[in-house]
Image: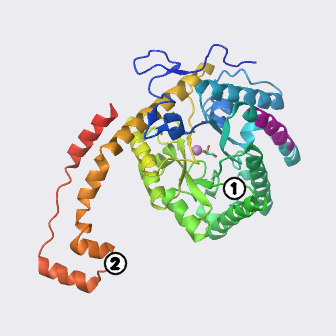
Amino acid sequence: MSYFPNINKIKYEGKDSKNMLAFRHYNPDEVINGKTMKEHMRFAVAYWHTLTNTGSDPFGAGVNIRDWQTEDPMQEARNKVEANFEMLEKLGVDYFCFHDLDIAPEGNSLEEFFKNIDEITDLIKEKMDKTGKKLLWNTANMFTNPRYVNGAGSSPNAHVFAYAAAQVKKGLDVAKKLGAENYVFWGGREGYETLLNTNMHLEQDNIARLFQMAVDYSKEIGYVIPFLIEPKPKEPSMHQYDFDAATAMAFLYKYNLQDHFKLNLEANHATLAGHTFQHEMRVARTFNALGSLDANHGELVVGWDTDEFPNDLMECTLAMYELIENGGIAPGGINFDSKVRRSSFEMEDLFIAHIAGMDTMARSFKAAAKLKEDGFFDKLVAERYESYSSGIGKDIVDGKANLKTLAEYALKNGEAKNKSSHIEYVKSVLNDYLV
Ligand code: XUL
Ligand code: CO
C-alpha cells in the first residue's frame, strides 16, 4: 500500500530546478569538511505535525486530506506507520521522533494505551529493522489528556503525577525497544496558570523528582541515553518553568541533573522567549549542553507558536554556525517540529514543505561552513578581545590579577580607549554569505 503513489524518491536537481518535488540545495551525498551533508544534518520527521495534525486551529476545523485517516483508531495508527516509513524513504530522511500519543490511541484505560503502544511499536520496530531508519527521540505526551489540566510532574494532584511517571516509564521502555538516541521532556503544562494558588517550590521539586526517577530507571533497564529538556516560555501554560535555555540550565544545576540532561532547542520557542535561535544555542553551548534541535520558524508579526517550516536564511545560518562550533549535533539531530500552513492541505505538501525546510537548512549549513572556513567570526571576535591575550588582560584571565593590581594599573595608565565595532559593515558583509 502506498500513500504517495505519485511521488518518487526525492532527488537533488540543483538550484535551477523548477521541480517542487526535488532538492535544490540539499545534496545528501555532498561532502563538506569530511562528512556528507546527510551526516551533518541528521534530519528527522516529527510524527505529530506530519501524520497526526489535522490542520484544525482554534477558529476552524481540520482541513488536511490524509488517506491514512479512518474510523478505527488502531487501524489509523497502523496506517500512519506505513505512511511514516514511506515518507522517510522517499525523502531520504534517516530519523523520526514521536510522542506516545502520536503513534497509538489511548483507548479506555492506561492498560489499553500501553497495549496499543506495544502493538504499534512492534510494527515500527519491524519497519526500522527492514529500512534502517532510526528513532532520534521519543517523548510522552503529558499535556493533551484532560487529566493534565494542571500539569504532569507539576500537577497539584499526586495521582496525576503517578500517571505521568507511568507514561515516562513506558516511554523509556519504548526508547530501549526501538533504540532511541535521546529521550525528550517538553514541559507542555509544567508551569502555572496563576501564582495565586501555586506552590512553585513544590512543583519544581516534583518535576526534578520525576526527572531523577527517569535517570534512575534508565540505569535500571541498562539504557542510558541523553535526556533532553525542551525549553519554551509559555503556551499552553501562562508561564512554563523551562522558560528558556538559561532557565532550564539553572534548574538542572539546582537539582544536580546536569550530567544526565542536555537541551533540545526549538527556533520558535526561542522567538516566544524574546530570544533568537542563535542565542539559545549559544547559551546551551556555554554549558556544553546543546543536545538536539527542533527546526522551525516563528512568525514574528503573529506572536504565537506558528511552527512554520524553516525559511529564514539569516536565522538558520547563524544557528548552523553554532552547530558547527559545537562540533556537530550528534547524537542529536535536526527534527522538523514544523507544520504545513493550513492552506497547504494536500498530501503532497508534506513533501514540498520538508524539501523546502531541508533546502533552507542545507543552504544555511553551507553558508555557515564558509563563514567558519573564512574565519569570519573567529577573526572578528579574536580582534575584539585581543586585550586579554597579553599584559594586564592575560593576568586577568590567568587569575593573576586582583583589585589592588588592577587599581594600580588603572591609576597609572590613564583613560581606557575603546574601538568602534563597525557592526553595520560586518552585517553587510554577512549578507553576502547568504546568497
Ligand atoms: C511544542 C513542542 C513539542 C515538543 C515535543 O511546542 O515543541 O512538540 O517538541 O513534545
Ligand atoms: Co518542539
Rendered position, 195 above or below 141: below
Q: Residue at x 70, y 19 (%)?
A: 3
For the N terminus, which image quadrant?
top right
Q: Secondary structure at mark 1?
A: loop
Q: Quadrant of the C terminus?
A: top left
Q: Which residue is mark 2?
A: 399
Q: Quadrant of residue 420?
A: bottom left
Q: CA distance from mark 2 to mark 1?
A: 48 Å
- The structure residue drawn at horizontal position 76% and vertical position 35%, both measured from the top left corner, is 124
- Magenta part of the protein: which range? 115-127
Q: Amino acid at mark 1?
A: Asn
Percent position (x, y) of residue 264?
56, 50
Considering every residue shown, the one lying at the far top of the view is 6
Give the x, y percent position of residue 334. Answer: 54, 41
Which quadrant contains ligand 2?
Answer: top right
Label 2 neighbourhood size at 10 Å, few (<14), some (14-19), many (20+)? few
Judging by the rendered image, the residue that carries numbered circle 1 is 150
Closer to the observer: label 2 or label 1? 2
